[in-house]
Image: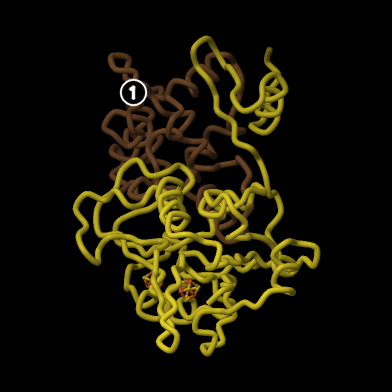
Amino acid sequence: MNKTLNRRDFIKTMSATTIGVATVASGITLTTFASTNKVPVTNEKRWGMLIDTNKLTEADIDGMVSACQKEQGWGSELYSTGNQKPGWIKKLKVKDKATGKVSNLALMCQHCEEPPCVDVCPTNASMKREDGIVLVDKHLCIGCRYCMMACPYDARSFVHETLRNQKEHMPRGKGTVESCTMCVHKVDKGEVPACVASVNSDAVIFGDLYDVSSKINQTLKTVQSAQIRADLNLNTGIRYSGI
Amino acid sequence: MNRFLIVFLTLLISSAFAHTNEHANLGEQASSIKASGKVFHESISIIRKIHPEFLRHKRDKTLRQGVRTDEYSLKGCVSCHVNKDKTNNQYRSVDKKGQFCSDCHEQVSVSLDCFTCHRTIPKEGSL
Ligand code: SF4
Ligand code: SF4
């Protein structure tokens, strides 16, 4: 067999025999990855979330936080203390001073359409994808933390210690800033973010805000909803109802 | 300037290979693919010379544009060039001394930054 195969042909040939894992030689397996998204994302979509605080229980929020930790691999830092600890998603209690009504919020990066973090970043590391997901390019982040100061939602945290064995899909490293990625690695495969999947009710709806047939778009048309700090005109991708 | 750097690095790398003749530690899957006569990288000399450029190109496309194909993904490099410690059946990190990545980088004294953030062994739970 002296026909030369390029990598793609090789993978194709191998995955014709098995799906996901192809056996190369006895006892040795070659893992192939689901190849999705061969074309760049466009601004025809805008990913968003609608969180119904009336339906979302405190236990739901705790579940969302741990689902995020498990998926992305943050939260078990050994040496970071107090405010150094990362927090991609938090449980927040808000009280209406007039009525005394207390609501529990799950607060993460709001994936602003006009993100202040992107505005202030001196290296273009803070960036917004065409489909509205705001990310930190850690290849470019110099750790100045300007974005952390600029974010009105305290959504970002800084990695203070050397890490090993990060998640394969979520590189994280000392000296860089990080925040909710809306589980972009899952969304690009057509899945929903881990926090959304962890909630058993329809208290959290994820989807394309622009798609008129999407559940989130339909729901937003019929229920009252709000942006947190709507006065800042950031047009957030995360919306709340019941507050 | 960059061209000179590449030529210089190539010389260094080829002297590293001349020194060891063959890569001492290709990694288990990579070795078995090679032994089977299949060609994985279209040109070994190109992948040796400009693998940082491939990775840089891929990282920008993946992160900024959401293009998630296999070609030149760091995950792919790791899963193929990693070795298992036979005594405890655990993966050895690719950046550890004597392993695929660090072997060359050490030889040519070029720092290996990818793995301060990226995982050095294949996907969790795949052991
Ligand atoms: S919530 Fe904060 S981190 Fe997220 S996009 Fe808005 S400003 Fe940036
Ligand atoms: S910490 Fe990183 S992402 Fe944030 S503003 Fe500075 S360079 Fe940009």
- The quadrant of the image that shows the N terminus of chain A is top right
Q: Tell me what residue is drawn at x 47 percent, y 70 percent.
A: A126
Q: Is residue A41 left or right of residue A186?
A: right
Task: From the image, state the color of chain A.
Answer: yellow
Q: Quadrant of residue A175?
A: bottom left
Rendered view: B21 above or below B109: above
Rendered view: B127 above or below A148: above
Q: Tell me what residue is drawn at x 48 percent, y 68 percent.
A: A109
**Circle 1 is placed at which residue position?**
B90
Q: Which image quadrant shows ligand 2?
A: bottom left
Q: Check the image and name the residue furthest to the right.
A: A213
- Whether residue A236 appears in this view of the structure is yes
- Whether residue B8 appears in this view of the structure is no
Question: Which element type, helix, strand or loop, lies under badge 1?
Answer: strand
Chain (brown): B
- The amino acid type of the residue labelled 1 equals Gln
Q: Tell me what residue is drawn at x 32 percent, y 14 percent.
A: B86
For disc 1, the chain is: B
Rendered view: A91 above or below A73: below
- Tell me residue B99's x, y (percent): 33, 29
Label 1 CA crowd tier, 10 Å (few <14, some 14–19, many 20+): few
Nearest to the observer: residue B21 or residue B41: B41
Q: Check the image and name the residue furthest to the front.
A: A99
Q: Is residue A216 left or right of residue B56?
A: right
